[in-house]
Image (cartoon, rainbow, N blue to C red):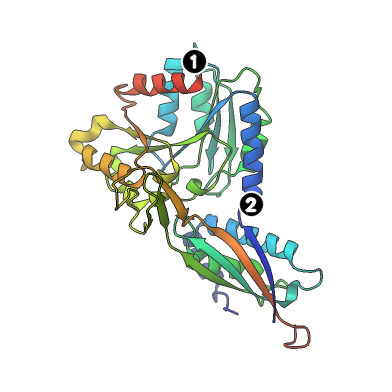
Amino acid sequence: MRALPPTWNTLCGKLAFADMHELGIAENILQIVRQSVPEGQTAAVRRIKLRVGKLSGVVAESLDFCFGVMIGDTDMNRAGLDIEDVPVTSKCRECGNAFATDDFAFSCPACGGNSIEVVSGRELEIVEIELADESGEQI
Amino acid sequence: MSVITIERKVLEKNEQIAARNRQIFQEHGIFVLNLVSSPGAGKTSILEKTFQELRDELNIAVVEGDVQTDLDAQRVARYGVPVIQIVTSGGCHLEATLVQDAVGNLDLKELDILFIENVGNLVCPANYDLGEALKVVVLSTTEGDDKPLKYPAMFLNSSVLLINKTDLIPYVNCDLNRLRNNALQINPSLRIFEISCFTGAGIPEWCNWLRKKEV
């Protein structure tokens, strides 16, 4: 588990930079995890796998930091985030061509068409939650 | 180790409430616009100009979102427009549940248009559906012509771009053609209006578009 910053000054300073945005996202993640894990097993949560698209507006480092602050000294304080970055890909509605759009140029490189559907890159999803076995590590 | 597969959207709760808001707006036939921009781009000034042009023919209401103060609500109220102020106390964007609560205080029956003025921020408001029909992004010329490329999600998720403060073009380092091209590269279907709240240029065209959309 990542250690919290040594002083409140550092903590507040970092939180200010981290933005309220990721703090709210971390809160949502915690809520969903608590709803999804069988009762009494939240302390066993070790890894939460997320899919975060490049268009989701979420900064992985900030989210990781905020999540660490949120779980602080709760029963879930041994959980960590495993963030998969999802690139932006699009599909042309005119010719059906699929293409990577990490440069955010939303016109079709094949036919020049301007009617583009974003296929991936907006994701902000919890994929899976990994729990330590009761018989294994001590909780 | 055991693994629970859940595949849930982190913002699912917001999306559910936004869908409920949208249904209520549609049932009442209200055209709802979510106004987004960086702080100081001119969202409130655009609202003031819009009221001057449309208040005699359309019933308009406003939900104001700010981190602090009800200064914007005071400005809007001067035009006799019903306004609800949301103070987020630090929150960087509006969420659907805040809009749901605010709208509960408005008389929706007679309403034609509802403007939701989001918190000034070109990042997070892009990803929070409030139940609006469409997002309108405001970019002022003083911010520079590169902003669509720097904040692509906002321009991709918006349907209309209002380029404000065009009267300042002679004094600022902003190329209107480049700004347009940058915005259209991100979102080729953006409807663009060039306006100035100071001179009033472009406001009639924007209001004509609103008249047609509202019907």
What is the x, y in percent for residue A43? Answer: 74, 75
Which circle, 1 or 2, is nearer the viewer?
A: 2
Amino acid beneath label 1: Arg
Using the image, name the chain to which the residue with label 2 belongs: B
Above or below, B134 relative to B112: below
Residue that extends furthest to the left in the rendered view of this protein: B170
Residue under the point 30% across and 32% down: B165
- Looking at the rendering, which quadrant does residue B145 occupy? top left
Amino acid beneath label 2: Glu
Residue that extends furthest to the right in the rendered view of this protein: A39
Of residues A38 and B141, the one nearer the viewer is A38
What is the x, y in percent for residue B185? Answer: 31, 46
* Count of numbered badges drawn on the protein: 2
Please give the label number shown on residue B103. none
Residue under the point 54% across and 42% down: B68
- Looking at the rendering, which quadrant does residue B132 occupy? top right
Please give the label number shown on residue B12. 2
Residue that extends furthest to the front in the rendered view of this protein: A95
Q: Is residue A66 left or right of residue B171?
A: right
* Mark 2: secondary structure: helix
* Mark 1: secondary structure: loop
Please give the label number shown on residue B55. 1
Q: Is residue B168 left or right of residue B153?
A: left
Q: Is residue B56 left or right of residue B9?
A: left
Q: Earlier in the sequence, mark 1 or mark 2?
A: 2
Above or below, B126 relative to B52: below
